[in-house]
Amino acid sequence: MNLVLVVNAGSSSLKYQLLNMDGETVIAKGNCDRIGVDGHLSHKVPATGYVLEQDCPFPTHTEAFEKLVEVLTTGEAKVIDSMSEISAVGHRIVQGAEIFDRACMVTEDVINQIDALSELAPVHNHPHALALRACTKVLPAGTPQVVVFDTAFHQTMPPKAYMFGLPYDDYKNYHVRKYGFHGTSHRFVSAALAEAMGRDIKDLKIVSCHLGNGSSITAVDGGKSVDTSMGFTPLDGILMGTRCGSVDPSAVTYVMDKHGFTPREMSDYMNKKSGFLGVSGIGSDNRDIQNAVLDGDEKAILTSDMLQYQIKKYIGAYAAAMNGIDAVIFTGGIGENSWEVREAVCENMEYFGIKIDNELNHKTRGKLTKLSVEGSKVEVWVVPTNEELLIARDTLKLIGK
């Protein structure tokens, strides 16, 4: 078997999938959670339906990796005899800034560079570096490791799209610019759509809507990102689960002053206490918001309306930026499963060439489906994302070279 382990490390978690790339199937997957707190393992073997839930101490990412190796190679959850059977490990990295515009092999210098970018992604990059070092300790010597960057896909944006209206020295000295995120997802679904349509991606203008607890919308022209809604950090863009999205900067300083917040406290306020949660007062899960909408809750209705309106605006803006649009993609937890959001976004867009089959839309959850009706100038699709598979493909391609 041609096995690739895909790792997605957070500050207190270590998500993983072991894939057999001969058939692109998942052999095992799980999450080592609450690292540095107490520790919990969730592990699944899809082929047998075996599920393991276990509390275990994870003081650091190293212990989490050691547990990962244990469950993959021993006991009832065992799927391989030894980690030496794994061809390579692919790691998802959130922030590569302007240093990394493509996947690359892991070296000590690369790990140090990723760690040095922690100021641009404090919640993600330092844990990524810790996980890379922990993985190197635990794996058999010489096992190839590859890093795949969320920001890399957006490195094709032109300066007019990624620059802010701040003094140029802030860009030159402090690297303040739009970076964009969810790049691996946008790259996967846009390529999958082109294949489903039977078209060359170089001939397509696509607006890709990755909608979930974190959401971003990307203009993909000829297979390249030319603009995206998330900015310097994943806080920018549309309303999200607990993130406010785009806000007038003066509103930020005004609210800071009213609450007496420090910059860090204001950042937490916008990242963790705003969005669906802050506007609705109900929670950060869109399913809870939609249930409250059915009950007539006014703030839930407002939250839902804001989200749908903002998505619609981005679709129009990006069609203008690309001088046309061939297709709209809905992906991510909300995009793939919420017919309510899809229907509201596509409503009254006939003038734009968008018209969907509402009956089909109501029935569609999490599967590749064309929602637009015959004759719709712009095709509308649900395209399930699979970032882990793309990371595994990138990893194999790189070690093959």
Image (spheres, grey):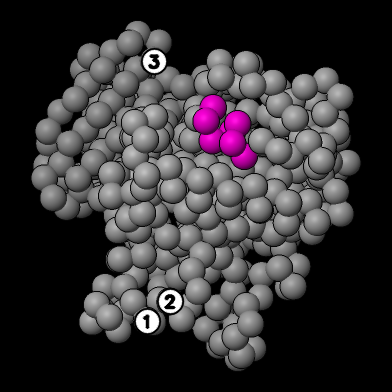
Check residue 251 in the rendering and tell me which mark sits there, or answer none: 2
Quarter of image, res 396: top right
Disc nearer the start of the sequence (3/2)? 3
Which residue corresponds to mark 1? 254
Relative to 220, 333 lies left or right: left
Disc 2 residue type (three-letter): Ala
Q: Is residue 351 visible?
A: yes
Percent position of residue 42, x then y: 25, 29
Give the label on residue 46, or none: 3
Foreground tag (3 vs 1): 1
Relative horizontal placement of residue 172, taking residue 116 as reference (left or right): right
Packing grade of label 3 (10 A; few <14, some 14-19, many >=20) is few
Q: Which residue is nearer to you in this view: 54 or 297?
A: 297
Q: Residue at x 48, y 60 (%)?
A: 245
Judged from the image, the secondary structure of the residue bearing numbered disc 2 is: helix
Cα separation, mark 3 vs mark 1, equals 51 Å
Q: Residue furthest top?
A: 48
Q: Specify the quadrant of the image occupied by residue 401.
A: top right
As drawn, 138 above or below 243: above
The CA distance from mark 2 to mark 1 is 5 Å
At x 59% / y 68%, what residue is drawn?
178
> Is disc 2 in contact with disc 1, using a CB cutoff of under 8 Å?
yes
Q: In the image, which disc is placed on residue 332?
A: none
Query: Circle 3 — which element?
Result: loop
- Boundaries of the magenta span: 339-345
Q: Is residue 313 above or below residue 270?
A: above
Quarter holding residue 22? top right
